[in-house]
């Protein structure tokens, strides 16, 4: 299995099926696997209890790809009437030593004086979003994107898939308004990065087709000039014909741009909500004549301090500027808000 999209789909399917009680045998980098489905999973996927899994649309197998109905049917394996899977980890190791030095090493606060005032264990929700993403133009690019973030701070994190965590179990979490906007921003950045070769190839094709178009109409103008010079046509008529050719070139160029315009789509297909222990580190920040309190988190899964997120653009931050209300900002947003 050389296609990275197929590999990500395979990993997602294996993790989800195993988490809902299915037995799966699907070696990595292989196009086919085998599963013994639990009755609810078999009903949701409309498949027999024992079925072959494949990244291709093969007869007598369950197709695991973006073109199949697997992602839509997989919703039936999640809690009823929702596409959200709530999980909980009861206990994890939390750092016990002082965090003053780790905070000083990890963070910079250019426009404030900051000191650590304490650290307390808290239960924090982490959201793991799965998006079906696409770029549509003259060609299509499709992929599956995963975004993990701290639901409190909105900071995007690099965390292991909770579906593979043996300590995570199904749980009833408090119903909360989930803010998808930070995940969408992060997914859009990931989509652009993942599609860089596709975009480069498309831009090269556009440049090539534009050059061909210019060459064709330049030759058309030269040919028209040659023929017009051999006739008795007035200069005004000659200029009008040149303008007509140039207008046609402009129209064709605009059609070409429209044809190659990238149209991105991001469709959330699953959300895993994980409640886990974390260490909330309280910071006291002094700026000008005011002070404020802010929390950062030591993550027990990554065993490191989490970044913050810019309150305006969502950028992941370790270099934190504060506005007058002590909202974290990136340097660009802070500069845009500075008085002129």
Image: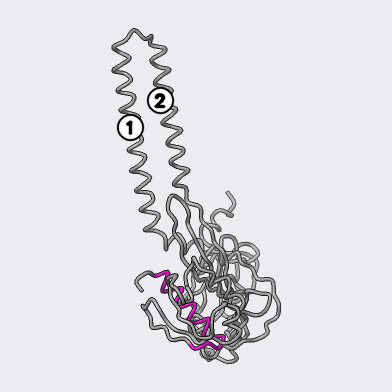
Q: CA distance from mark 1 to mark 2?
A: 11 Å
User: Answer yes or no: do the residues labelled 1 and 2 have beta carbons within 8 Å?
Assistant: no
Residue 90, how many percent across, how many down? Answer: 60, 91
Nearer the N terminus, badge 1 or badge 2?
Answer: 1
Q: Is residue 22 left or right of residue 10?
A: right
Choose between 308 and 133: the one closer to the eye: 133
Q: Which label belongs to residue 245?
A: 2
Name the one closer to the observer, 37 or 280: 37
Name the foreground residue: 328 vs 63. 63
- In which quadrant of the rendered view does residue 91 lie? bottom right
Q: Is residue 217 visible?
A: yes
Q: Quadrant of residue 273?
A: bottom right
Question: Is 15 part of what is drawn in magenta?
Answer: yes
Identify the secondary structure beneath mark 2.
helix
Q: Which residues are magenta?
A: 4-23
> Does the magenta portion include 224?
no
Query: Which residue is under mark 1?
Result: 216
Q: Secondary structure at mark 1?
A: helix
Q: Is residue 181 above or below residue 206?
A: below
The answer to whether residue 241 is above or below residue 313 is: above
Few, some or many C-alpha atoms within 10 Å of disc 1 (few <14, some 14-19, many ≥20)?
few
């Amino acid at each position: 299995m050389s296609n990275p999209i197929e590999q990500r789909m395979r990993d997602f399917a294996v993790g989800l099926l195993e988490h809902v009680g299915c037995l799966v045998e699907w070696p990595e980098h292989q196009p086919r696997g085998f599963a013994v489905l639990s009755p609810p999973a078999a009903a949701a996927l409309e498949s027999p209890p024992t079925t072959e899994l494949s990244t291709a649309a093969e007869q007598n197998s369950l197709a695991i790809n973006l073109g199949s109905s697997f992602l839509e049917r997989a919703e039936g394996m999640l809690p009823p009437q929702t596409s959200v899977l709530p999980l909980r980890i009861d206990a994890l190791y939390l750092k016990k030593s002082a965090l003053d030095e780790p905070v000083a090493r990890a963070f910079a606060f250019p426009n404030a004086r900051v000191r650590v005032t304490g650290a307390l264990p808290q239960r924090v929700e982490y959201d793991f979003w799965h998006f079906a993403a696409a770029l549509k133009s003259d060609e299509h690019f499709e992929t599956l994107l995963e975004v993990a973030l701290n639901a409190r701070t909105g900071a995007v994190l690099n965390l292991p898939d909770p579906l593979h965590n043996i300590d995570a179990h199904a749980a009833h979490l408090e119903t909360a308004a989930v803010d998808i906007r930070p995940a969408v921003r992060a997914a859009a950045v990931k989509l652009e990065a993942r599609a860089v070769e596709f975009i480069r190839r498309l831009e090269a094709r556009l440049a090539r087709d534009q050059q061909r178009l210019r060459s064709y109409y330049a030759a058309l103008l030269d040919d028209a000039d040659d023929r017009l010079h051999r006739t008795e046509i007035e200069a005004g008529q000659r200029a009008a014909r040149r303008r007509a050719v140039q207008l046609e070139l402009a129209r064709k160029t605009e059609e070409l741009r429209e044809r190659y315009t990238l149209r991105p789509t991001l469709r959330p297909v699953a959300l895993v909500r994980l409640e886990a222990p974390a260490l909330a580190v309280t910071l006291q920040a002094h700026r000008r004549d005011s002070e404020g309190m802010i929390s950062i988190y030591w993550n027990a899964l990554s065993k490191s301090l989490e970044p913050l997120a810019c309150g305006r653009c969502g950028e992941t931050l370790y270099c934190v500027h504060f506005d007058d209300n002590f909202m974290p900002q990136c340097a660009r947003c802070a500069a845009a808000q500075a008085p002129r």
